[in-house]
Structure formats: C-alpha cells, structure tokens
Image (cartoon, rainbow, N blue to C red):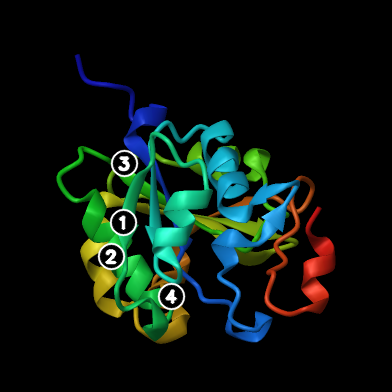
Amino acid sequence: MTPPKNDESQVVGLLLAAGGGRRLGGRPKALLTHRGRPLVEHAVRMLREGGCARVHVVLGAAADEVRARARLEGCVLVDNPEWAEGMGSSLRVGLASLVGTGAGAALVGLVDQPGIGSEAIGRVRAAYRSPDSLAAASYDGRRGHPVLFGADRWRPVAASAHGDRGARAYLAEHEREITLVECADVAEPYDIDTEEDLGRLG
C-alpha cells in the first residue's frame, strides 16, 4: 500500500548542528546549554514533536564531545569534516545522508534557533505534497526556517550550497515555487550568534 503523500514518515528532519560558534568565543552551538541540556537535544526534540519521526543531525565542531554529552538516541549522526567552510557544506553532507533512505523530503532546521518550536515545524512539514515540494516558514511575510526540500530538489540544492549561504541562492532562484507557511504567531526566528544572544537561552 502506498503511503499518503503527506505521511510523516516521508519527511525526515535534517538538523544542521556543526557550527563552531566563532562569534561565541569558539563554543560549539550544539553544546550551548538550554533548559539544562545541550541545545542540540532541544532542537531534535522540536523536530520530533513537530512530526519528523526520523532525524538526521549533522555534526562538525566538537563532534566527539557532542556525541558524548548529548542524548541523541535514534538519530542518524552525520559528520561534516569540512564544517568550518560554513553551512553550505553541512547542508550538502546532510542531504547526501538522506539519499537511499526512502525519504520524500528533508525538513531543514538550524540548531541555533530555539525560538522555532514544534508548532512551526509541524506547519511546514504539513506542506509536503510530493518529491518536488518546496516550502518554508514565513515570519510576517519574510522567509525563514525551517525549510522543506522535496527529494527531487536535493541534488540542485546541494550543488548551489556554498560557504555560509546554505540554500539561499537556490531559494532566491526558485522563489516563485516556494510555499510560504506563516509561523510568526507561534515562533520567533532569532539566531544565537553573539554573547548577547545567550540571554535568550533558558
């Protein structure tokens, strides 16, 4: 029996958690403390509560320490040895890890956006219709994360992902094809990038 096109097993959460926290004095973002536990645990939990039964996590900076300290049971952990090159390399490695898994789409989230919770993730995940799907959360009309890429789009997305820009070039080129899902009423898309931002962590 063919599963429904929006069946949650078709959409795999892809968490980019490789950053070294350059503007945070070199503290890996995955290991920042949020609610008493590593931030990466919170991000994984939000993806699961948002409907992603399967989650792949891309690790880079302090990958061994993240494995040792964070409870990531059930996740597929993917190493990005070129993490210092920027988010683009993590996106490429993460999408490559999904090839052959039967996933119809990747729902891409960032470890340093704790203000984006399960409700926003669930809304964007529900936009999946086919392997050609392309959707993104919107905050008062401005595109943000998470972003959903149908499997047919993985190869061109990866080919365009360089430096710290991630999928921005691809999304700009295909802007008219993106299904925007308004999430400003349930999430805040701030990043944890600087010392001042640490005050947003619980």
Q: Position of residue 171 (x, y in %)?
A: 43, 71
Q: Amino acid at mark 1?
A: Val
Q: Amino acid at mark 2?
A: Val
Q: CA distance from mark 3 to mark 1?
A: 25 Å
Q: Secondary structure at mark 4?
A: helix
Residue linked to disc 1: 78
Of badges 2 and 3, nearer the viewer stands 2
Q: Secondary structure at mark 2?
A: helix
Q: CA distance from mark 2 to mark 4?
A: 10 Å
Of badges 4 and 3, nearer the viewer stands 4
Of badges 1 and 4, nearer the viewer stands 1
Q: Earlier in the sequence, mark 2 or mark 4?
A: 4
Dots 2, 4 in contact, CB < 8 A? no
| Quarter holding residue 194 | bottom right
Q: Secondary structure at mark 3?
A: loop
Residue linked to disc 3: 130
Dots 2, 1 in contact, CB < 8 A? yes
